[in-house]
């Protein structure tokens, strides 16, 4: 699988490939990129599953800049710097040669957050809260290490077996020195911060820093809640202009049932001035992550009212179950005009008829109510009725 353009490099490449295949057994392909392939692999000694990203850097041999290899080595360096956090992908092993680099990561069987969102369209506020809290904790951690990710988006967020967030793809990540500003244009258009766009368009721009990750978090949170990004437009130039103007809205009807707290947090994330934009630590302190919000718009959770509402729901369900046993309302007009229409009253009438005439009305006689009286009544029942009527008249 590993090849070399130079005869001197054949042995090292073969040794690297031999070392990898001696330790891991490659399985099916999980994904492909322009210059890389991701395969599921199994560690032979432990039986644990991993994801191996095999990067072909042989094209760098024709490019004196060696951009792909340098970018990969920089990514490895950043991954080692931010290692150990539960919501950041773990780099388990590295095999390096002049033509290939093998990166062995922990495997996330639930795939990308983007694919999950494609299936469910949008997340509830509760699920969004869980995802965003984990994402902000990961971003807070890398920012404390002076690392800016520069390409936060649902495609670069993986979900493990328990659907926990795993931040990945640090290919554009950069370690910043104190007060350092960046000017390079990189990332994905819909998630780019306005100051990053200005840095690529104007010579006298101030550059950008870690704040661009916070802006991207705002775009992600908006997308999770309603299933589409805040600045999307089919014409990319209009979309970029909307980003630079901070032009977005909580449109109806998608946002009608979403409470005010997530909207308030998004407003604090999508702030044009990066100096006024909140940090990841401040985002985690927002009430959205502290207060349990009821389904009623803008209302804070109240235990007593929720309990009372629960009782009403139970009573409603019981009434629905008993509906077939509940007598239908009988008005005077119905009683005079068509009393036999009501099932309950019909049973009473038929019951009385059976007691008086010792038979049920035949099915063929249902259309003729007079048939009830074509038979002679039982003598004892007639006597009892007459006596009851006399008694009633005397009283």
Image (tube, rainbow, N blue to C red):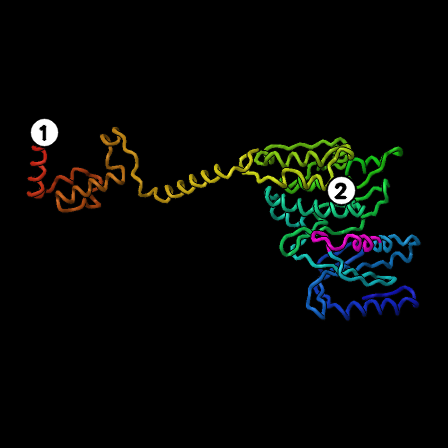
The C terminus, quarter of image: top left
The reply to whether the magenta stretch includes residue 387 is no
Q: Which residues are magenta?
A: 74-89
Q: Residue at x 79, y 45 (%)?
A: 148
The image shows residue 184, relative to residue 271, as above or below, that is below
**Can residue 255 be seen in the rendering of this structure?**
yes
Numbered badge on residue 366? none
The front one of 201 and 257 is 257
Under tag 1, what secondary structure?
loop
- The percent position of residue 368, horizontal first and vertical second, equals 19, 38
> Are there few (<14), some (14-19), or many (20+) residues within 10 Å of tag 2?
many
In the image shown, does 248 or 277 lie closer to the viewer? 277
Mark 1 neighbour density, 10 Å: few (under 14) some (14–19) many (20 or more): few
Q: Is residue 12 left or right of residue 351?
A: right
Mark before the other along the chain sequence, 2 or 1 = 2
Question: Would you identify the image quadrant in which residue 367 lies?
Answer: top left
Image coords of residue 36 (percent x, y): 79, 57
Residue 183 shows in the view = no
Q: Residue at x 70, y 66 (%)?
A: 42
Q: Which residue is mark 2?
A: 213
Residue 307 rendering spot, x and y as whole percentages: 46, 40
Vertical order, 304 against 76 (above or below): above
Say whether residue 259 is left or right of residue 94. Answer: left
Q: Could you tell me which quadrant the N terminus lies in?
A: bottom right
How many numbered marks, from 0 up? Answer: 2
Viewer-proximal residue, 351 or 24? Answer: 24
Q: Disc 1 marks which residue?
A: 395
Asked whether disc 2 touches disc 1, contact meaning CB atoms under 8 Å apart, the reply is no
The quadrant where residue 317 appears: top left
Q: CA distance from mark 2 to mark 1?
A: 91 Å
């Amino acid at each position: 699988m590993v090849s070399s353009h130079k005869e001197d490099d054949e042995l090292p490449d073969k040794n690297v490939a031999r070392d990898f295949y001696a330790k891991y057994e490659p399985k099916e392909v999980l994904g492909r990129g322009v210059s890389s392939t991701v395969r599921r692999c199994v560690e032979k000694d432990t039986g644990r599953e991993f994801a191996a990203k095999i990067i072909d850097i042989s094209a760098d041999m024709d490019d004196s800049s060696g951009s792909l290899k340098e970018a990969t080595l920089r990514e490895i360096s950043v991954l080692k710097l931010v290692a150990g956090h539960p919501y950041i992908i773990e780099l388990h092993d590295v095999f390096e040669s002049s033509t290939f680099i093998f990166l062995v990561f922990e495997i996330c069987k639930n795939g990308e957050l983007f694919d999950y969102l494609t299936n469910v369209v949008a997340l509830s506020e509760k699920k969004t809260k869980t995802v965003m809290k984990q994402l902000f904790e990961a971003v807070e951690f890398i920012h404390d290490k002076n690392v800016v990710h520069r390409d936060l988006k649902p495609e670069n967020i993986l979900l493990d077996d328990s659907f926990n967030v795993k931040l990945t793809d640090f290919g554009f990540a950069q370690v910043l020195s104190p007060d350092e500003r960046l000017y390079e244009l990189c990332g994905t258009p819909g998630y780019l911060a306005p100051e990053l766009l200005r840095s690529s368009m104007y010579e006298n721009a101030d550059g950008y820093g870690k704040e661009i990750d916070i802006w991207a978090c705002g775009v992600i949170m908006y997308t999770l809640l309603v299933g589409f990004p805040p600045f999307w437009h089919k014409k990319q130039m209009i979309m970029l202009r909307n980003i630079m103007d901070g032009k977005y809205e909580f449109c109806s009807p998608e946002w009608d049932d979403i409470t005010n707290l997530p909207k308030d947090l998004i407003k604090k994330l999508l702030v044009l001035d990066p100096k006024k934009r909140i940090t990841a630590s401040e985002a985690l302190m927002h009430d959205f992550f502290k207060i349990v919000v009821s389904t009623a718009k803008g209302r804070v959770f109240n235990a007593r009212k929720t309990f009372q509402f629960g009782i009403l729901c139970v009573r409603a369900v019981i009434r629905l179950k008993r509906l077939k046993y509940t007598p239908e309302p009988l008005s005077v007009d119905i009683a005079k005009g068509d009393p036999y229409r009501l099932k309950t009253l019909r049973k009473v009438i038929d019951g009385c008829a059976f007691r008086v005439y010792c038979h049920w009305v035949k099915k063929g006689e249902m259309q003729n109510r007079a048939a009830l009286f074509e038979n002679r009544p039982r003598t004892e029942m007639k006597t009892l009725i007459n006596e009851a009527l006399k008694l009633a008249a005397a009283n």
